[in-house]
């Protein structure tokens, strides 16, 4: 059947300085990752075998399906929202504070349901927020002051820019005509000055700067690369000549430490200067399949390691994992035939001349998963399915087993399977790294609406997953940052102090100590926008400045190109065990 169709490829001249277009290293690690021991429990549910992670259910009802999530600084609450298109959720608007939204004044149709909530990570309480425009498949990021800027969505929400401040009783401010082009399935990235661009979206082969509040863009910047990476099938489809597949929505966009942005769509990637609007480099094709929505692979930038000895050398690597065969969406959507998801990862060093993809294999196939960077610098792959694609009811075989990826381990020994969950987390699932080092996991809605009497129902349960470093046997290694005695406002390139209370007689600076800054990510549809972990240089450690108190002197990132201004979670890890993070601001 697939042989009856061909893939359309459009070639438009771009300003490329190109490397070899199809080269990659092939590392067959399918049979070399270690078989990990499975944690066992006794009849009381206590873990008795090796600690391989642990799941806990913290709420039965998130109120709204967690299609979009982000941890908000200062308030320590997770913002969750979905879409207003269904005019229903599991949390009604509080009538005294938030009257119903009039959807259609002519037909007098009202929406009296909440589509946005704040979830308290300490006590699981919900706080209702009111959205007017449709946020379905939108994007977002945090400002310098830790407030949310959200872009795009569906229909009347597609050209919208929204603002949500982290203050008591604050609610959304929405501007439906702020963007020049509709941004449905687009990606928002923070720039070195704290501003944003929003990239791509359905029928939006362009990007644009987010304008100041209350202003509107008149036009966007055309990026032919986004048009050229869109897939279609040619054939007789009734009235249509083409079957649209796309595979380049929600492009993976990462800020590079030289101030440019890396853009990955489908199986291709470029380096874009967002200020001159020039494509300055094209990277090799990542073969094997497609990686962006609806093929929905995962991507992170690996920890950015800063060195005091070589401050001018900043390695930068991108990891792309999973996805689907380029035509998998066609078979899932039209025939409900679910092709196996991709099992491979590609790893690319952007700072290496003539870089090529280093290819390796995960323990299992995965589509629609999330990748969370941990405070230690490892990466957890979580959620998703083993076959099919994104979109309503287009996937099967939930992947319940998280996988730990160790970037610094030798090739062939980087993957480790962790404790399996029990709740399918497929289309529209999400996750968030929390200050205590746990991962909040929520969402999963494979249905067009809130539907509960089907094989994979809309799921409103919220869980927390504890990675291996939460093993109680490692508690003595967990440092306690003394918030009131540590610096929380950082200056670029400046030294700062972090004081920790410790059960260790002294901290070894050379090998065992790591100070990291984590940028909270806006997560939706398997991609975490603006997620980055920066490993800081440690200048000095003064042990026992008071009994049991150690003072760590670290060096802040050199510029906004490495760490865009704003709020970060700062962690101190010792011998692989992170502290509870504290909020710091750099500007």
Image (spheres, rainbow, N blue to C red):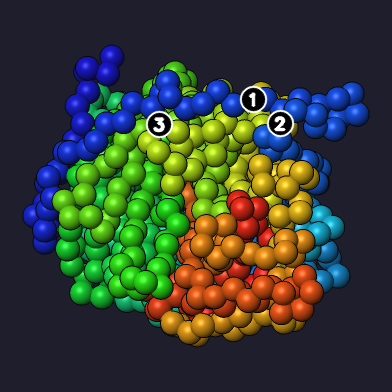
- How far apart marks 3 and 1 lie (CA) works out to 18 Å
- How far apart marks 1 and 2 lie (CA) works out to 7 Å
> Residue 410's spot in the image, x, y percent?
40, 38
Q: Is residue 378 visible?
A: yes
- How far apart marks 3 and 2 lie (CA) works out to 22 Å
> Residue 567's spot in the image, x, y percent?
57, 74
**Quadrant housing residue 449:** top right
* Residue name at image x 69 percent, y 43 percent: 465
Question: Which residue in the structure is indicated by mark 3?
Answer: 412
Question: Which residue in the structure is indicated by mark 1?
Answer: 37
Disc 2 element: loop
77 sits to left or right of 409 = right
* Residue name at image x 22 percent, y 17 percent: 3
In the rendering, which numbered label is found on residue 461?
Answer: none
> Is 384 or 556 nearer to us in this picture?
556
* Residue name at image x 77 percent, y 61 percent: 503
Classed neighbour count for the residue bearing mark 1: other residues with Cα under 10 Å, few (<14), some (14–19), many (≥20) = some
Disc 1 element: loop
52 sits to left or right of 196 = right
Question: Are the two marked residues, 3 and 2, in contact with CB atoms closer than 8 angstroms?
Answer: no
In the rendering, which numbered label is found on residue 50?
Answer: 2
| Label located before the other in sequence (3 or 2) | 2
Instruction: Please identify the quadrant where the N terminus is shown.
Output: top left
Above or below residue 317? Residue 275 is: below
Question: Are the two marked residues, 1 and 2, in contact with CB atoms closer than 8 angstroms?
Answer: yes
162 sits to left or right of 112 = left
Classed neighbour count for the residue bearing mark 3: other residues with Cα under 10 Å, few (<14), some (14–19), many (≥20) = some
> Residue 538's spot in the image, x, y percent?
51, 71
Disc 3 element: loop
**Quadrant housing residue 321:** top left
């Amino acid at each position: 059947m697939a042989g009856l169709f061909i893939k359309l490829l459009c070639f438009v001249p771009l300003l490329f300085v190109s490397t070899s277009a199809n080269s990659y290293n092939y590392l067959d690690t399918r049979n070399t990752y270690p078989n990990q021991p499975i944690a066992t429990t006794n009849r009381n549910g206590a873990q008795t075998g090796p600690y391989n992670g642990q799941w806990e259910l913290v709420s039965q009802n998130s109120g709204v399906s967690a299609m979009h999530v982000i941890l908000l600084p200062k308030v320590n609450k997770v913002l969750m929202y979905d879409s207003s298109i269904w005019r229903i959720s599991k949390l009604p608007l509080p009538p005294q504070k938030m009257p119903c939204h009039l959807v259609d004044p002519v037909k007098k149709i009202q929406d009296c349901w909440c589509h946005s909530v704040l979830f308290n990570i300490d006590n699981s309480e919900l706080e209702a927020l009111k959205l007017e425009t449709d946020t379905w498949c939108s994007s977002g990021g945090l400002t310098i002051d830790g407030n949310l800027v959200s872009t795009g969505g569906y229909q009347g929400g597609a050209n919208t820019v929204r603002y949500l401040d982290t203050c008591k009783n604050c609610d959304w401010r929405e501007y439906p005509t702020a963007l020049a082009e509709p941004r449905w399935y687009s990606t928002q990235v923070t720039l070195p000055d704290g501003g944003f661009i929003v990239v791509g979206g359905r029928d939006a082969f362009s990007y644009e700067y987010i304008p100041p509040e209350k202003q509107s863009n008149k036009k966007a910047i055309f990026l032919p690369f986004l048009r050229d990476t869109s897939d279609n099938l040619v054939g007789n489809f009734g009235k249509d000549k083409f079957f649209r597949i796309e595979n380049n929505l929600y492009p993976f966009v990462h800020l590079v430490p030289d101030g440019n942005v890396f853009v990955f769509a489908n199986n291709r990637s470029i380096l874009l200067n967002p200020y001159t609007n020039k494509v300055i480099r094209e990277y090799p094709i990542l073969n094997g399949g497609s990686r962006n929505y609806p093929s929905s692979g995962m991507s992170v930038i690996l920890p950015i390691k800063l060195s005091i000895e070589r401050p001018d050398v900043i390695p930068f690597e991108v990891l792309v994992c999973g996805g689907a065969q380029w035509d998998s969406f066609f078979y899932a959507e039209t025939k409900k035939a679910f092709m196996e998801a991709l099992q491979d990862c590609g790893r690319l060093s952007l700072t290496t001349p003539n870089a090529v993809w280093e290819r390796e294999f995960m323990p299992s196939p995965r589509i629609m998963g999330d990748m969370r960077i941990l405070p230690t610098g490892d990466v957890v792959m979580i959620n998703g399915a083993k076959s099919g694609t994104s979109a309503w009811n287009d996937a099967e075989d939930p992947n319940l087993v998280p996988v730990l990826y160790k970037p610094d381990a030798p090739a062939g020994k980087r993957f480790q399977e962790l404790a399996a969950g029990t709740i399918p987390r497929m289309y529209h699932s999400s996750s968030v790294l929390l200050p205590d080092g746990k991962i909040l996991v929520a969402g999963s809605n494979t249905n067009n609406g809130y539907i509960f009497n089907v094989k994979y129902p809309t799921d409103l349960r919220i869980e927390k997953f504890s990675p291996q470093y939460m093993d109680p046997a490692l508690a003595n290694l967990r440092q306690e940052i003394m918030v009131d005695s540590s610096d929380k406002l950082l200056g670029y390139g400046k030294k700062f102090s972090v004081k920790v209370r410790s059960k260790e007689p002294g901290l070894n600076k050379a090998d065992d100590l790591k100070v990291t800054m984590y940028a909270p990510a806006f997560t939706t549809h398997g991609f975490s926008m603006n997620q980055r972990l920066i490993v800081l240089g440690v200048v000095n450690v003064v042990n026992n400045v008071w009994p049991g108190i150690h003072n760590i002197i670290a060096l802040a990132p050199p510029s906004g190109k490495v760490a865009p201004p704003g709020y970060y979670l700062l962690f101190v890890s010792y011998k692989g065990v992170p502290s509870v993070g504290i909020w710091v601001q750099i500007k």
